């Protein structure tokens, strides 16, 4: 399989070549030159496979330059019941992403696809854990090393650290805003004692952390010499690892060929639902992909109106589903590439327009008229909707959900079709978001046993000024490069 840039001005590459890459050199995103097709017969033959083996089947179509047996081993070592053990009553840990039926709503079976049973209680573990294994393998193969520099306001940083901890050839330098994360998030990240994990609490806000990563990464000599890389959400391997749970979810929810299901996806940077789009393009029988946003409704606006409007910083809301607080959706370009018929010149032109004006208006275009052929529908959810949905799902079904999943279920309910199962993706466990759970239910969320007392563990973190020169020196001193 070869990968091309959405903007058409970069050389085609193999999976291994883009594994550690971010943007293509022309500023586009890497996409496979074609989607491998999974027939109904193939799909039926996957029934009864473990999650790891479904992931292997999907990955092997995209990562065909990694030896088959290596890929098989990496997926089996990654997707184990021990690693995805934070299940609740009614869920089977062996399923890795268990299906938790809620009930029948107007003739539609509604269930939760539990994606957040991994080490950091969020769905980002699904891709990040595999990425850790793939990186370690590729670096060992090439005799190379990698220093991951990232900025986090909470969730992504911990998923990256738990995926990379203890891995040979990899160090993580993770910047977070000093004193701005929750006690739980701090404990989760700072209690890691692996020597290859370096937590840096920056005296500033999240934007300062991001600006430092940008400043350090834009010094190309330094970046090359220090072997600096990132694990951001545009990484192709991250997207493709997520395709696996759409297939596995479909297998759990159906019992015969051709049966359709819909997925509701709490969305921010469009990575998760982009994986659903890819699964659908590969032939998975998906009726609808329900894009759920919070008050930051860039994507909902686009799917309703055809207008994609990047939000200014002042227009970006801090909400109670914070992992969906985005001003633009960094993976959206991947879908636009398909929507525009893979015309790379048009994609390049459209993104020049977005860069210049902040707006793309496809409302009058024939492409937008065909958007429903891709199965997308959308909706938005507010703080009041989240609180009401958390309360209502708890009262009706006895299941406590996190605020992002609540956004998904709120919007899913506007798009139910009788007889077509609706699978709401659970993108985090409620234990991570105690405040809104207390507001909705008047009590604290349950904590998985492995997180009891985590705030009492010793913490390792260095407070640093918001000065990228000092951070460059610190990194160089640690890497010894
Ligand atoms: C990252 C995240 C999302 C958004 O996923 P995207 O791939 O950015 O669309 C939703 N919910 C939670 C809990 C997340 O951490």
Image (tube, rainbow, N blue to C red):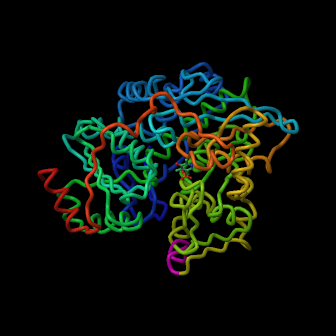
Determine whether, in the image, residue 440 is placed left or right of residue 2. right
**Residue 375 location, x and y as percent?**
72, 50
**Residue 160 location, x and y as percent?**
38, 45
Per the rendered image, the range of residues in magenta is: 349-356
**Residue 141 location, x and y as percent?**
24, 36
Which residue is outermost to the right?
A: 106
Determine whether, in the image, residue 181 is placed left or right of residue 225. right
Q: Nearer the viewer, residue 112 or 58?
A: 112
**Residue 205 location, x and y as percent?**
40, 65
Q: Nearer the viewer, residue 263 or 384?
A: 384
Determine whether, in the image, residue 2 is placed left or right of residue 480. right
Q: Main secondary structure of the magenta part?
A: helix
| Magenta segment includes 408 | no
| Magenta segment includes 351 | yes
Q: Quadrant of residue 362?
A: bottom right
Which residue is outermost to the top?
A: 48
Give the residue displayed 63% in from the left and 69% down from the top: 308
Q: Nearer the viewer, residue 417 or 29?
A: 417
Q: Is residue 343 above or below residue 146?
A: below
Give the residue displayed 61% in from the left and 74% down from the top: 360
The N terminus - image quarter: top left
Q: Quadrant of residue 332?
A: bottom right
Q: Is residue 311 above or below residue 281?
A: below
Give the residue displayed 43% in from the left and 24% down from the top: 76
């Amino acid at each position: 399989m070869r990968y091309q840039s959405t903007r058409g001005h970069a050389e085609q590459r193999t999976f291994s070549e883009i594994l550690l890459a971010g943007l293509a050199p022309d500023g586009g995103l890497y996409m496979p030159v074609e989607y491998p097709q999974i027939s109904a017969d193939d799909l039926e033959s996957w029934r009864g496979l473990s999650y790891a083996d479904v992931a292997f089947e999907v990955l092997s179509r995209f990562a065909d330059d990694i030896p088959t047996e290596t890929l098989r081993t990496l997926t089996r070592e990654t997707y184990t019941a021990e690693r995805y053990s934070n299940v609740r009553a009614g869920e089977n840990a062996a399923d890795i992403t268990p299906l938790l039926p809620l009930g029948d709503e107007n003739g539609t079976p509604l269930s939760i696809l539990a994606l957040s049973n991994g080490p950091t209680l969020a769905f980002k573990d699904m891709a990040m854990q595999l990425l850790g294994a793939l990186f370690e393998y590729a670096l060992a193969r090439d005799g190379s090393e990698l220093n991951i520099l990232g900025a986090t306001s909470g969730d992504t940083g911990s998923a990256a650290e738990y995926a990379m901890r203890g891995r040979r050839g990899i160090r993580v330098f993770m910047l977070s805003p000093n004193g701005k994360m929750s006690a739980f998030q701090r404990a989760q990240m700072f209690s890691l004692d692996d020597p290859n994990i370096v937590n840096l609490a920056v005296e500033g806000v999240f934007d300062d952390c991001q600006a430092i990563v940008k400043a350090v990464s834009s010094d190309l000599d330094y970046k090359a010499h220090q072997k600096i890389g990132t694990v951001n959400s545009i990484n192709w391997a991250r997207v493709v690892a997520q395709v696996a749970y759409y297939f596995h979810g479909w297998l759990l929810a159906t019992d015969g060929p051709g049966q359709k299901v819909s997925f509701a996806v709490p969305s921010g940077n469009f990575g998760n639902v982009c994986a659903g789009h890819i699964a659908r393009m590969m032939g998975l029988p998906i009726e609808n992909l329900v894009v759920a946003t919070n008050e930051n409704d860039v994507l909902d606006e686009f799917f309703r109106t055809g207008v994609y409007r990047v939000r200014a910083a002042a227009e970006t809301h801090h909400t109670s589903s914070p992992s969906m607080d985005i001003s633009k959706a960094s993976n959206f370009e991947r879908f636009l590439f398909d929507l525009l018929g893979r015309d790379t010149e048009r994609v390049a032109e459209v993104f020049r327009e977005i860069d210049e004006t902040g707006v793309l208006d496809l409302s009058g275009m024939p492409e937008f008229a065909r958007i429903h052929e891709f199965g997308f529908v959308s909706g938005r959810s507010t703080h009041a909707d989240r609180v009401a949905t958390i309360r209502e799902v708890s009262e009706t079904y006895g299941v406590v959900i996190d605020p992002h999943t609540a956004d998904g279920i709120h919007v899913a309910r506007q798009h139910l079709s009788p007889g077509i199962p609706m699978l709401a993706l659970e993108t985090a466990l409620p234990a991570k978001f105690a405040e809104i759970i207390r507001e909705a239910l008047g009590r604290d969320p349950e904590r998985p046993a492995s997180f009891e007392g985590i705030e009492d563990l010793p913490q390792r973190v260095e407070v640093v000024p918001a000065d990228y020169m000092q951070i460059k020196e610190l990194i160089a001193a640690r890497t010894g490069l």
